[in-house]
């Protein structure tokens, strides 16, 4: 029997997140971090006229909340900070060929306060992919892309048509979520990326995925 010291087991490598070349700021620079931000998003699946989200950090501290107004002409979601101040309101445009959401600063509806627009990349999709255009982008090339699944459990948010990863989302399934009729997913936002903006995109993606009435 060998008396020498057993070789030590290899230590799992740490994933490194290459920083984006320029900080990605859409809602505000106060939502940038120099480290990967892990967020937990939970939503109550069924509530009368409302579909509220809570967004917490790894310690369970409330970071954002999303309030909804569904019983109106336009579906609207309000992304608020922990104190209840509205950062962005998200409005669904019903009468468009591709399902389209617009994000305005605060509670404004004015064109000058349009931060970004998100729409399905294609009319017919087996998995949801979104093109995201900043308010001042009137062209055809999106500033960001969301590549994910209609039935898949994860998605990625990329910079433009590049492979530069900005964030990843993973849906979580548990017995508790089934019993409590809640839905939850984790989001990893890479360093120097506006995590309020990523949260708004995750809300839009979830709303589009939840609408299974047709391929629009």
Image (tube, rainbow, N blue to C red):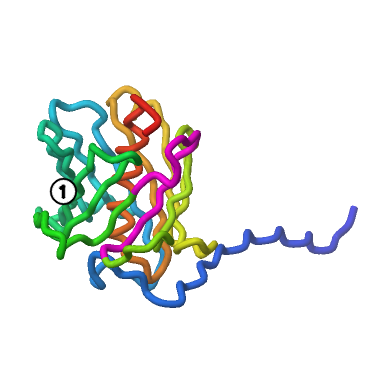
State the count of labels.
1
**Would residue 122 be seen by someone viewing this image from the given angle?**
yes
Instruction: Determine the secondary structure under disc 1.
Output: strand
Residue depicted at x 15% and y 48%:
78
Viewer-proximal residue, 98 or 196? 98
Residue depicted at x 37% and y 27%:
214
**215 relative to 163 in the view: left or right:** left
Residue depicted at x 32% and y 34%:
183
Decide: is 68 above or below 174. below
Residue depicted at x 33% and y 56%:
198
Residue neighbourhood size for the residue with mark 1, other residues' Cα within 10 Å, grouped as few (<14), some (14–19), many (≥20): many
Q: Mark 1 points at which residue?
A: 78
Residue interval drawn in magenta: 119-135
Which quarter of the figure is the C terminus placed in?
A: top left
Instruction: Verify whether residue 214 appears in magenta.
Output: no
Give the image location of residue 152, x and y in percent.
49, 36
**112 relative to 173 in the view: left or right:** left
Give the image location of residue 6, x and y in percent.
78, 59
- Occupied quadrant, residue 73: top left
**112 relative to 214 in the view: left or right:** left
């Amino acid at each position: 029997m060998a008396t020498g010291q057993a070789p030590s087991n290899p230590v799992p490598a740490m994933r490194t997140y290459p920083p984006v070349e320029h900080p990605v700021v859409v809602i505000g620079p106060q939502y940038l971090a120099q480290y990967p931000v892990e967020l937990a998003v939970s939503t109550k699946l069924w509530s009368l006229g409302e579909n509220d989200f809570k967004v917490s950090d790894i310690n369970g501290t409330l970071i954002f909340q999303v309030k909804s107004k569904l019983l109106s002409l336009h579906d609207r979601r309000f992304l608020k900070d922990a104190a209840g101040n509205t950062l962005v309101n998200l409005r669904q445009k019903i009468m468009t060929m591709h399902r389209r959401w617009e994000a305005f600063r605060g509670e404004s509806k004015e064109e000058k306060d349009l931060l970004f627009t998100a729409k399905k990349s294609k009319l017919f999709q087996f998995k949801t992919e979104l093109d995201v255009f900043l308010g001042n982008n009137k062209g055809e090339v999106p500033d960001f892309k969301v590549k994910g699944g209609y039935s898949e459990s994860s998605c990625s948010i990329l910079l433009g048509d590049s492979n530069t990863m900005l964030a990843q989302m993973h849906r979580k399934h548990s017995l508790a979520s089934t019993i409590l009729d809640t839905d939850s997913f984790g989001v990893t936002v890479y360093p120097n990326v506006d995590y309020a903006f990523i949260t708004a995109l995750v809300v839009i993606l979830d709303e589009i995925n939840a609408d299974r009435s047709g391929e629009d």
